[in-house]
Image: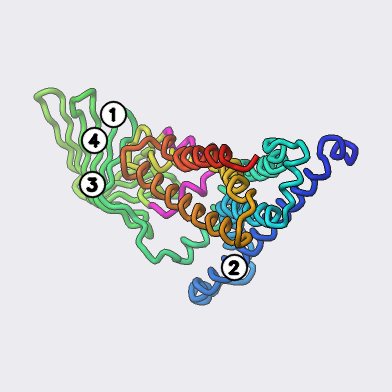
Amino acid sequence: MKAFLKKYLKVIDRYIIKKYLGTFLFTLGIFIVVTVVFDISEHLDNFLKNHSTIKEIAFKYYAGFIPFYMNMLSPLINFLAVIFFTAKMANQTEIVPILSGKASFNRFLRPYFICATLIFIVSFFANIYLIPFTNRLKITFENSHQFNGEDPTKSEVHIQLDKRTFVYMQSFDNSLHTGYDFILEKFDGDQLREKLLATSISYDSLKRVWTLKDYTVKYVNGLKEGWYDSKGKSKDTVLDMRPTDFIVYDNVYTAMSTSLLNSNIEKEQIRGTGALKEMLYEKYRRFVYPLSAYVLTLIGVSISSRKVRGGIGLPLGIGIFLCFTYIVVDKFAFVFAVKGSMPPLLAVCIPNGIFGIVGSYLLYKAPK
């Protein structure tokens, strides 16, 4: 292994990789510690009020909290780390001898992109496999301890169960698993064939059936109509829906595995409850977001490899400004995808696309 590294990684490569990864891991660790301290101070009342044990807090909440923020912050921390140590190298006149020794700027970028590739691989597999699992721990803990303090129950929900069956529910009580003013309609093409109305519908989690109470059914066959009145009786029925379909929590889709998310996307394309865009955005983001490691590394090297007066302060200030700009663009893209008419795939690609163009321009202007 050592022979392989010595053959393909020269002294300058190993020097830059050591600085890169060392600065990145140290900075990421500092940010995570600060984030955890602030989060503890913010949610201490919730922990005490719900009598949470240290084991629950550490292995359920923070076991999900820390990986989530490490993954979310890693591209931005990576960006600041690159700017910090590269600007320091430029300030100490370490880059000039490298470029003067017949090494091209692209050759100088090689160790940076080796490290960016390592970060990309870790972030990619974390997004696909690890983060959904740890997010499930975090979100389950938050919901059970009422961190949000809001009623997550949907009201006036329309759901399409299959190509010919539509459901409406005026309100749903999650604690009782009971919905009120329930309507089920079945169509044959554009013609209404059956309409069921019930004052309430309850879900039995053991039998996995829905119980209709005080219901009436209207049958339509051309110009002929028929009625059935249950006269207060109940009826058990199987429907392709669950109480979770009427409950919404923040970031619930980030806690789904990729296979489960794909399955829910297929159902949502039929049901049309309005969550399809958010699901698609989450799916595409898992694959696209790790590419920011390359984009931000390119920008970071390009703006900090030139020696300037004042040391590392100016490049670091520009880097912090670009970090906030990247976050703002990412949030706007999410809003346009979920609330607007922008395709989710396009919205996911916008931040990396815009900053990729900026990085290419800065690379063109970088000292060679």
- Mark 1 vs mark 2: in front: 2
Distance from the alpha carbon under mark 3 to that under mark 1: 19 Å
In x, y percent, where is residue 154?
A: 32, 52
Label 3, secondary structure: give it.
strand
Span colored in magenta: 248-266
Residue assigned mark 4? 185
On screen, 159 above or below 181?
Answer: above
Whole-Å distance between the Cαs marked 1 and 2? 53 Å
Q: Residues within 10 Å of mark 1 (few under 14, many from 20)?
A: some
Vertical placement of residue 294 versus 20, above or below: above
Q: Mark 1 or mark 2, which has the lower sequence index? A: 2
Q: Nearer the viewer, residue 353 or 28?
A: 353
Whether residue 250 is in magenta: the answer is: yes
Q: Is residue 237 left or right of residue 357?
A: left
Disc 1 residue type (three-letter): Arg
Decide which of tag 4 and tag 1 comes sooner along the chain: 1
Q: Which mark is residue 164?
A: 1
Percent x, y of residue 250:
42, 54
Numbered mark located on residue 198 in the image? 3
The amino acid beneath tag 4 is Glu
Query: Which disc is residue 34 wearing?
Result: 2
Residue 196 colored magenta? no
